Amino acid sequence: MSHICPVKHVHWLHAHAQKDQWHEEVVLITYEMQWTVRYFLHKNRNWEEGAVSTTSPGGVAYALWQGHMWRKMADLAFKNMTSHYMSPCLDIK
């Protein structure tokens, strides 16, 4: 009978550590999702600034198209993944 209590205690410690690891993973993934969207927004701004500094009509069109593509990726990234995710796109327009 004396072996049951330590075994249950070790099992509980293991389960508790695993719960903490999963919680940490959720926090990290949430930040990684936001970092990804912020990177897309950064690329969008870079291309839009490039469109302003370019003089050739073709270069302007290409830069605006690239900027639009990056903004669209930022808007759509992780949109349907979870209701708990708050996109940085909501802060930046």
Image (spheres, rainbow, N blue to C red):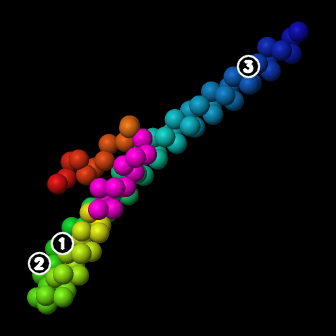
Q: Position of residue 84 (x, y in %)?
A: 38, 37
- The answer to if 81 sits in the magenta stretch is yes
Q: Quadrant of the N terminus?
A: top right
Is residue 53 placed above or below 15 in the rendered structure? below
Measuring 28% from the left and 50% from the top, which residue is drawn there?
88
Q: Quadrant of the C terminus?
A: bottom left
Q: Position of residue 17 (x, y in %)?
A: 62, 31
Residue with the mark numbered 3 = 9
Residue with the mark numbered 1 = 48
- Magenta residues span 72-82
Answer with left or right where residue 41 lies relative to residue 56.
Answer: right
Report the amino acid beneath label 1: Glu
Distance (Cα) linking label 3 and label 2:
65 Å
Taking depth in this image into account, of 33 and 3 the one nearest to the observer is: 33
Residue with the mark numbered 2 = 52
* Residue at the top extreme of this rendering: 1
Q: Quadrant of residue 41?
A: bottom left
State the count of labels: 3
Distance (Cα) linking label 1 and label 3:
59 Å
Q: Can the viewer see residue 20?
A: yes
Measuring 19% from the left and 53% from the top, which residue is drawn there?
92
Report the amino acid beneath label 2: Val
Answer with left or right where residue 89 lies relative to residue 18.
Answer: left
Taking depth in this image into account, of 4 and 57 the one nearest to the observer is: 57
Look at the numbered discs 2 and 1 and tell me whether their residues touch, using CB distance below 8 Å: yes
Taking depth in this image into account, of 81 and 30 the one nearest to the observer is: 81
Q: Can the viewer see residue 39?
A: no
Please rate how many residues cluster around mark 3, counting C-alpha atoms within 10 Å: few if below 14, some from 14 to 19, many from 20.
Answer: few
Report the amino acid beneath label 3: His
**Element type at mark 1:** helix
Q: Position of residue 27 (x, y in %)?
A: 45, 41
Q: Nearer the viewer, mark 1 or mark 3?
A: 1
